[in-house]
Amino acid sequence: MARVLTPRAEDFPRWYQDLIAKAQLADNGPVRGTMVIRPVGYAIWERMQADMDARIKEAGVQNAYFPLFIPESYLRREADHVEGFSPELAVVTHAGGKELAEPLVVRPTSETVIGEFMAKWVDSYRDLPLLLNQWANVVRWELRPRTFLRTTEFLWQEGHTAHATEADAREHARDVHKNVYQAFMEELLAVPVVPGRKTKGERFAGATNTMTVEAMMGDTKALQMGTSHELGQNFAKAFDITYSSAAGSVEHAWTTSWGTSTRMMGGLIMVHGDDNGLRLPPRLAPIQVQVMVVKAGEGVTEAAAKLRDELKAAGVRVKLDDRADVPFGRRAVDAELQGVPIRVEVGPRDLAAGNVTVARRIDGSKSPIPIGDIVGAVTSALKADQQRLFDDALAFREERTVDVKTLGDAIEAAQTGWARVPWSAVGDAGEKEANGKAVTVRCLTRADGGMPDSDEEPNLIAYLARSY
């Protein structure tokens, strides 16, 4: 395989940018920090979106859409929220050839505008819970953009819900966190994550609790892959989201919000990619199998088309590459770069012997397979390779996560991996010290890995790492 990417071990950031460009996933947009997602990359995002959307709907949530422009006054009604976002806001002051009477904020997130309409739509306890989600773009003015990971404009889903009780809101936020986000990351993306509670210093602006799913990248840095927030009654009081209870009293609702974004694409690349390009989990891959004509003639193209049809009939997402006028080596490199899980290579010599060659992207193996056994061999390999990606990523994380007892040891360990340390050995002061050395507390968990109910629980464990 010709070397077309900077080796990961030599320069991981350069490898990442090389892969995005050479695999034709995305390009830089005309405005600094924006990106153009190319068809290859967008096809992956569509698969993510479809699976996530199904899980969200299974949780009882309905999709809606809210405006891109938000009156600046809406954000200012929840003080912590606007303060948390103020450095990142893009504000429109002129439109239609004149100065606007009130500046408009380009959507950084939608708690405030959705809160306005929740107040309008909720009247009685019978209207609750109100469970909404939208797929949209948002704008946050990034100082140090990086494609997929931090861009000025990105794509995401954001859920916003209102509930009659704090307990119901908490249960919903945890359900989404575990059964939508964690399950999605691990089952579809084959990315093992650590679920935990954010510290006060890392909490979402305006939230009473933020839960996260954290993943280790190939350079051992952490990436926050998704978050779910309990917002208490902060937004309900700011936007007067009230309801009449069964007893006839007027009560403020309890709200939540939760979101994942195209940042998951960056995580997918950095967890599974290697020096030959992207490696896509078979359950995610838009094209699971690429049947490739090595050389036309002698019935090769016809045999390849028949294999394509047989695999398609078996439920495999398959593409026929019969471009005999393009050198086979170039086509194979492109398939490797783009992470196609399996290539079925059909050439005159193998075909004469009744075989085809199966090249597996995940483990790098190539082997001749009798043409009559292809469907069974391919479906078995796809299932095995999905699990192998997850197992390899989990083993990588566990081998580079160490248990320590002091803040100093945790900061040192975080230079080359993750550290688990008693939260009592860190605390708020220790967290600030770690931040000054480019190390953050990624999340807090119970000793058994469970989700804490508060920051004040005894015997909590903190995960410390460098991060994106």
Image (cartoon, helix red, strand yellow):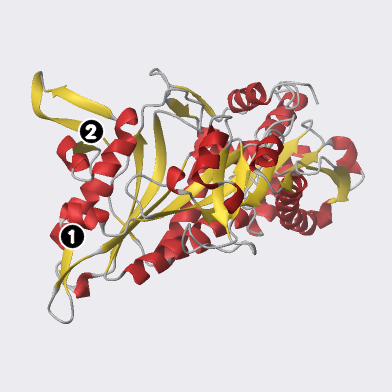
Q: Which quadrant would the N terminus be assigned to in this image?
A: top right
Answer left or right for 416 relative to 264.
Answer: right
Q: Decide which of 140, 68 is in the foreground and name it.
A: 140
Q: Residue at x 77, y 54 (%)?
A: 381
| Occupied quadrant, residue 73 | top left
| Callouts 1 and 2 close, C-beta under 8 Å | no
Answer left or right for 150 relative to 119.
Answer: right
Mark sitting on residue 429: none
Q: Decide which of 281, 402 is in the foreground and name it.
A: 402
Q: Is residue 188 visible?
A: no
Q: Which residue in the structure is indicated by mark 2?
A: 105
Specify the amino acid type for callout 1: Ile
Q: Position of residue 425 (x, y in %)?
A: 61, 49
Q: Which of the two discs, 1 and 2, labels the residue nearer the N terminus?
A: 2
| Occupied quadrant, residue 96 | top left
Q: Decide which of 234, 62 is in the foreground and name it.
A: 234
Q: Position of residue 103 (x, y in %)?
A: 15, 29
Label 2 Cα crowd, 10 Å radius (few <14 / some 14-19 / many 20+): many
Q: Residue at x 69, y 55 (%)?
A: 310
Specify the amino acid type for callout 2: Val
Looking at the rendered image, the disc whose residue lies closer to the viewer, 1 or 2, is 1
User: Callout 2: helix, strand or loop?
Assistant: strand
Q: Which quadrant would the C terminus be assigned to in this image?
A: top right
| Occupied quadrant, residue 33 | top left
Label 1 Cα crowd, 10 Å radius (few <14 / some 14-19 / many 20+): many
Q: Is residue 81 visible?
A: yes
Residue 222, relative to residue 423: is it above or below?
above
Q: Position of residue 424 (x, y in %)?
A: 58, 52
Q: Residue at x 65, y 64 (%)?
A: 448
Q: Which residue in the structure is indicated by mark 1?
A: 241
Q: Residue at x 50, y 30 (%)?
A: 38
